Image (spheres, rainbow, N blue to C red):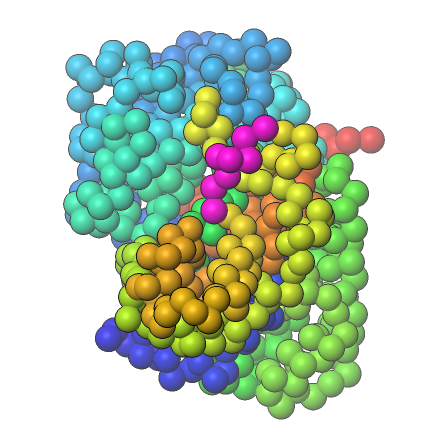
Amino acid sequence: MNNHSHSLKQAKTSLRSPAKVMDLNRLGSFYPYKLSFMRKLMRKVMQEQWNINRVLFNLDKEGYGEAVYEITTPSNCYHFVVFANFLDSTLRTDRVIAEAWDMTVTLRHGPFKPDELETLKENVPRQEKGRMSAESLVLSRANKSSRNFEYVVNQLSSGMQPCIKKINEVGYLYRTTAVYGSGKFGMADWGKIKLAYQDFKEPFSAEMFACFMIRQFSLDQADHIAFKRAPELAVRLDDDIKRYFGIGNATGLGMAPFLIKHPLLINSWIETREFALAQVISNTLPNKNTLQALNLLIQRAIIHLNEITTNNESQNKINLEASQSLGSIIKWLSKETLQEWDQFIDYVTNHYNVEAQELINTILIEIHPEEVLSLEENHDIEERYELSPEMKLLDLRQIIEKQYQWALQYDFNSKNANAVFWYRSEEKMEPRLGDRDIDQGAEKEILIGIARAVEQCHSTLNKLPPEININNVAEFVFAYPEHRQIIRRIQTMAKTKYGEIQANLLDKDVLPIHLLRCKLSFFGVGKFDPKSRLWVRNTMFQGAPITSDIGSKYKDDWIFPIMPNNQMSKGNEIH
């Protein structure tokens, strides 16, 4: 057993209960934190001083063409290939049905070989319809921000920096609409990546790095076009403004089932986060330095929340209430003499909603890096479910009634409790949500309704005819094979603390956006802009370093990014 697992086992008494943590509304209130994948990736890139160089930048005056960046790490070499094409604005869409994009990219292993460019040019822009080789780790595409890109280029070509407030309305020059990895379309699978390419052995780190590079190209492309338009007058985008630009992302239902289909992995992610919080609360005490850091970071979070721009009234209300709550918490802190963090947590829990609670938890983790960074090393999780055929039915029933009690509270004979079904689109192989009363295809339903499956299994156990001599799981699944899959999951998850989301995902009013935000928070994504209950726009890497920062002293402090106070944008404000 590794030290991390041993520590987790020792600390289980201080961890929050699954009933509290795995509530869907709370999961939908998670924020990126110090061990989110983007933060971990940036620490690695900066501390190891990865060398990122442009080896090809063949763009015309409008920014169309191809570019290649070579990435050298202490242990390996990669290259990042970009194809930037003209795209009619009427064809620009975030939807997965799109067939053309402003930019298509791939992250590949090894040094760049010019003779491969034509083959890549034939396949990368086609995305799902193309064919990649095992040298590719990631395939992605992105579209320009219609509000930001042309505006920024015009400002730079006129010799002026863009207005920070206008940039803040969107926060990026491009947004991705899909990021593929782990063996899709002929690329290297996850097994190969984590063994052969140690730089990307963390889950999703290759995909996150590809997004980081898309961001970098968007900044380079804007500078390039501005100088082509006005070589004598144009200025380069200021570095502080470059850092404030992130890379946008549009995320829909395709991401939601991941949390249900990988509960062992999710258990690991959440248990690590909860242990980090428990470490801080149990092992540290408030002092002058940490209280000052707490106060400053709460104030920064308030500014960050107030600067978020979205047309979604519900999200605006969430952000406003969270900001006001943090303001009240600061006032309370100024009047109290904290002796321990438990006192602080109890106050916040008793007086504020889950959004404010999780903000405070995130901030407490952030100001105690010495307690948290020891948990940074990823521990590979094998998503394997094993049936224990010898288990007595009495023991199985007890597990369900103890650990899945939450699933037994729903009445699935109620129309609303069983109103939707999840299925996979045959055309795009993407998850979709159907209405049982309206849509066809319920017979193709995928197992997302864990609560219903558990309740049905429990009901069957309770209704076994006494004359049928069934005593163990082997005999039960032989007689009732439809319950085999959920029993295997129940038996496996009984050994974990977290992992099962305690909600009915078949309910009429289910909010898949909570699933999206939970997973995105572990990626490191912030600034959520919901477009419906089914999909959300968000911003990645906002405030993060840019490639020219590599080699300089790294301050790992870009949580809650706020608008830079850049003097070069003065005189160019929006009136």
Position of residue 361 measured from the top left corner of the image (x, y, whole percent):
58, 69
Q: Quadrant of residue 547?
A: top left
Q: Is residue 89 above or below residue 443?
A: above
Q: Is residue 442 magenta?
A: yes
Number of numbered tags placed on the structure image:
0
Position of residue 289 measured from the top left corner of the image (x, y, whole percent):
56, 78
Question: Magenta stretch: dominant SS?
Answer: loop
Position of residue 567 measured from the top left corner of the image (x, y, whole percent):
65, 41
Residue at screen point 40% across, 67% down: 468
Q: Nearer the viewer, residue 366 or 421?
A: 421
Q: Is residue 119 left or right of residue 550?
A: left
Taking the view exactly as shown, the residue that stands out farthest to the front is: 467
Q: Nearer the viewer, residue 433 or 110?
A: 433
Residue at screen point 70% across, 52% down: 414
Q: Is residue 520 above or below residue 212?
A: below
Q: Is residue 339 magenta?
A: no
Which image quarter holds the N terminus?
bottom left
Position of residue 120 measured from the top left corner of the image (x, y, whole percent):
27, 17
Q: Is residue 125 above or below residue 543?
A: above
